[in-house]
Amino acid sequence: MSSTENLPSSVKIKGRPRGFDRAEALVRALDVFWRRGYEPASLAELCSTMGINPPSLYAAFGNKAKLFLEAVDFYERTYWDAPWARMAEEPDVHRAIDRFFKESGEILLSPQVPCGCLVVLAAINVSAESVEVFDAVKALRQEGIAHFSKRLKKGIKDGQLPARTDVKSLAAVLNTLLEGMSIHVRDGVTLSEMTKLAAYASRLLPARPPG
């Protein structure tokens, strides 16, 4: 995992009175969650990687669950808010989906995001007993489907997709493809291979209506 030197300048924040940089601590926690997953990640490894002791972790974040949820929020805001916004703003729905998936492939293979999507990979082994984390991760997955649904509905409204388009199913398929790309990263996929895979996303959309 790269250091905060590789983070966008907007997420670099000044050190807190507790004696550590919160953004850097979250980046280091992300690395543990990416590698281990939520459940297997131990407090001992988290504290060691973040450079703090257990009392400091509890004082700063509350507990392991709250640390994970803050790390997920940090991850989503840092890497995914802008791509989702660009997809929504692109006037042409086919081009919007195509560009979003191409950009997603680049993000997932970026040195700053070495192991794919945190929501997919770190949360695969979250048990139902970890209710707070389980519900939050499920909600985030639903957010992805909601983003796709909203864009597809706009495509229908703009006459770029047939009125009969099954938005619910198509949005779920697109989100499943995005999650699958994250898992594919773990298998050592190259950027060239990821680009080819991402290109299929826009092909899943129905053709433009005649005229």
Image (spheres, rainbow, N blue to C red):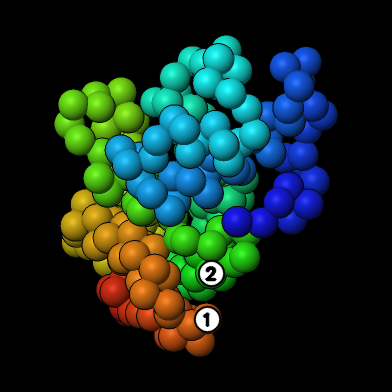
> Would you call the spot at circle 1 few (<14 residues within 10 Å), some (14-19), or many (20 or more)?
some
- Tell whether 106 sits left or right of 119: right
Q: Where 188 sits versus 21, above or below?
A: below
**Marking on residue 109:** 2
Residue at screen point 26% across, 39% down: 126
Split into 4 quadrants, where in the image is the C terminus?
A: bottom left
- Note whether 57 is above or below 139 in the view shown: above
The CA span between labels 1 and 2 is 7 Å
In front of the other: 174 or 154: 174
Q: Position of residue 107 (x, y in %)?
A: 56, 63
Observer able to see residue 134: yes
148 to 68, vertically: above or below? below
Q: Which three-letter amino acid code belongs to the residue tagged 1?
A: Leu
Q: Secondary structure at mark 1?
A: helix
- Residue 211 appears anywhere in the view: no
Which of the pair 130/43 is nearer the observer?
43
**Residue matched to label 1:** 191
